[in-house]
Amino acid sequence: MAMLRLLLLPLRAPMLLVLVVISVYEGLQWSQPLEGAAASGMGQLSSLFWSLDCLHALLVVVVCTMPDLLLQRISNLMAASRVMSLVISLLIVTVGGLYLLHLKVLTNVLILGTTVLLARLDLARIRVAPPPVLLAGVLGVLVLSGAWVGRWLASGG
């Protein structure tokens, strides 16, 4: 019975399917610079770009899955001292500025982050609430497997 409920989960929470489709799309988008790097003889650089994109996607999933835990930890660090408050504020502004300078990354973050948040909301609607670390792991696996399928489709499947 539990296995049947798990198999029917994408039908009960359709935003999980949307998350997989968005992940496939992201994998297709990430493969475009890889094709150019492979054509110019920089195959090792393309695997580095792929790894960075996967790490970036996992970071987005973790931040969107556990925002309350992360914000609580950051708030505690900032309350500890003025120096930590300044360092964290400068880090956030610098990273935010880098995203704004590279707008394609910002759009990918917004699309993936919104989809992860909608999937969490859909799971909460049907009263499925696993621990945050487990949910981050499952959504991370969904995103990375969808991105891998997108990469596979871009390479000619």
Image (spheres, rainbow, N blue to C red):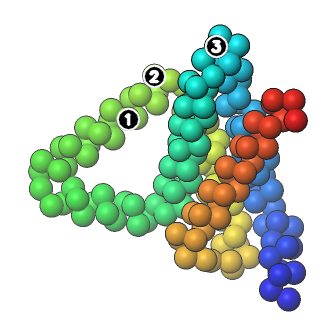
Furthest toward the top, the residue is 40
Q: Residue at x 15, y 61 (%)?
A: 80
Q: Which residue is mark 3?
A: 41
What amino acid type should be assigned to the residue bearing mark 2? Leu
Q: CA distance from mark 3 to mark 2?
A: 28 Å
Residue 51 shows in this picture: yes
Q: Mark 1, residues whose alpha carbon is within 10 Å: few (<14), some, or many (≥20)?
A: few
Where does the C terminus fall, quadrant-wise?
A: top right
* Viewer-side label of 3, 1: 3
- Tell me the element at label 2: helix
Contact between labelled residues 2 and 3, with CB atoms less than 8 Å apart: no
Quadrant of res 155: top right
Q: Mark 2, residues whose alpha carbon is within 10 Å: few (<14), some, or many (≥20)?
A: few
Q: Earlier in the sequence, mark 1 or mark 2?
A: 1
Q: Residue at x 53, y 37 (%)?
A: 52
Q: Earlier in the sequence, mark 3 or mark 2?
A: 3
Direction from residue 101 to residue 114 in the image, left or right:
right
- Residue 26, compared with residue 40, is above or below; it is below
Q: Which mark is residue 101?
A: 2
Q: CA distance from mark 3 to mark 1?
A: 31 Å
- Foreground residue, 114 or 8? 8
Residue 147 percent across, percent down from the top left: 71, 43
* Viewer-side label of 3, 2: 3
- Tell me the element at label 1: helix
What amino acid type should be assigned to the residue bearing mark 3? Gly
Q: Which mark is residue 95?
A: 1
- Tell me the element at label 3: loop
